């Protein structure tokens, strides 16, 4: 891989230590889409996962990241319901959204979109619905046809806790349900995407189930480098030190192999030190985006369109 780092005009070069990777530095130009805070960031501050400064930065605009206003094709249908999950021992809600020109009966690639801490299937995305996400136009062009599913995963960081295994729910219950609908039914037709805790979960899905998930896009993944760090910030994230090690996306990053992976992080995100460790660990084929931004809605919203476009290039219509 070439060592030259592409830099958007008007922005500073990325630190040389990442020069062996494909790193894109995003500038601050363009029309602004301001999504102040967002449920994920507020929940994390309120639970002590993020420092209180994050909330102050939101209030004074220091975390605002401008982005082009999104545009959409006419929306396809979507449906929301629930099912009784044996893995989670409760009913879980979900939403399935189809792209424009498609609906029930269509055979399509599938994006499993995982929500952040404090969220659920209705808040997995920032500033748009699942139906809007798969109808998005990026640089005036529609995405390749893909369906999206969101689901309630609770606050346990998409890993197993006593009596509650959201990862098994996704793999053993949600995905087969979608495949019975014709979504993600062929090889290389399921991608994982997520924000914050969901970004961690998306990476974990591809690491743990490489035969099921073809690609991943993680926006501001909430990752820690040690169990003590994780437990001190969010005691509910992992059931034990052994559980942390078994689900450590940094330690197990080589499992990503050559699968398409996109990771985006803001330099002022409190999780960014962990993301830096992740960047050093992922295969050199990974696409890494480092830019101005915090762990807030405006950064999440700015990275959703390029993340969706990235996945649309690697989830072909035919398996």
Image (tube, helix red, strand yellow):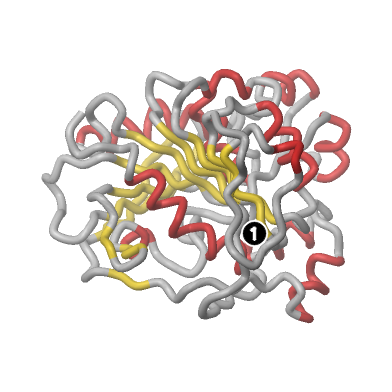
**x and y percent of residue 244 in the render?**
73, 26
Quadrant housing the N terminus: top right
Note whether 8 is above or below 231 in the view shown.
below
Along the viewing direction, whichever of 217 and 235 lies nearer the viewer: 217
**x and y percent of residue 301 in the render?**
53, 65
Residue 142 figure quarter: bottom left
Along the viewing direction, whichever of 187 and 172 lies nearer the viewer: 187
Residue drawn at 80 percent across, 65 percent down:
54
Residue drawn at 16 percent across, 40 percent down:
107
Residue 305 figure quarter: bottom left
Note whether 223 is above or below 271 in the view shown.
above
Would residue 125 be found to the left or right of residue 311 on screen?
A: right
Helix, strand, or loop for circle 1?
helix
Quadrant housing the C terminus: top left
Along the viewing direction, whichever of 254 and 135 lies nearer the viewer: 254
- For residue 43, say whether it is visible: no
Residue drawn at 46 percent across, 21 percent down:
209
Q: How many marks?
A: 1
- For residue 309, say whether it is visible: yes
**x and y percent of residue 136 in the render?**
33, 63
**x and y percent of residue 104 in the render?**
15, 50
Residue drawn at 53 percent across, 24 percent down:
256
Would residue 301 be found to the left or right of residue 130 on screen?
A: right
Along the viewing direction, whichever of 22 and 131 lies nearer the viewer: 22
Q: Which residue is mark 1?
A: 40
Residue neighbourhood size for the residue with mark 1, other residues' Cα within 10 Å, grouped as few (<14), some (14–19), many (≥20): many
């Amino acid at each position: 891989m070439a060592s030259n780092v592409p830099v958007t005009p008007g922005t500073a070069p990325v630190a040389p230590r990442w020069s062996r990777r494909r790193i894109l530095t995003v500038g601050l130009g363009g029309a602004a889409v301001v999504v102040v805070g967002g449920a994920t960031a507020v929940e994390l501050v309120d639970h002590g996962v993020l420092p209180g400064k994050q909330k102050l930065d939101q209030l004074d605009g220091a975390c605002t990241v401008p982005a082009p206003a999104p545009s959409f094709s006419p929306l396809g249908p979507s449906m929301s319901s629930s099912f009784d999950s044996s893995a989670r021992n409760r009913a879980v809600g979900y939403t399935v959204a189809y792209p424009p020109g498609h609906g029930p009966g269509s055979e399509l690639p599938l994006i499993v979109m995982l929500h952040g801490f404090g969220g659920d299937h209705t808040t997995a995305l920032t500033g748009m619905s699942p139906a809007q996400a798969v109808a998005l136009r990026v640089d005036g062009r529609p995405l390749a046809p893909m369906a999206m599913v969101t689901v309630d995963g609770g606050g346990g960081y998409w890993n197993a806790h006593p009596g509650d295994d959201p990862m098994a729910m996704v793999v053993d219950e949600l995905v087969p349900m979608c495949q019975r609908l014709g979504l993600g039914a062929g090889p290389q037709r399921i991608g994982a995407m997520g924000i914050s805790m969901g970004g961690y979960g998306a990476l974990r899905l591809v690491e743990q189930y490489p035969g099921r998930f073809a690609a991943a896009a993680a926006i501001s993944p909430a990752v820690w480098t040690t169990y003590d760090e994780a437990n001190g910030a969010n005691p509910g994230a992992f059931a034990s030190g052994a559980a942390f090690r078994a689900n450590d996306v940094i330690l197990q990053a080589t499992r990503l192999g050559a699968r398409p992976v996109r990771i985006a992080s803001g330099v002022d995100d409190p999780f960014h030190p962990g993301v830096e460790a992740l960047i050093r660990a992922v295969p050199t084929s990974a696409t890494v985006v480092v830019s101005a931004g915090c762990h807030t809605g405006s950064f999440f919203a700015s990275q959703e369109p390029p993340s969706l476009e990235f996945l649309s290039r690697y989830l072909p219509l035919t398996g």
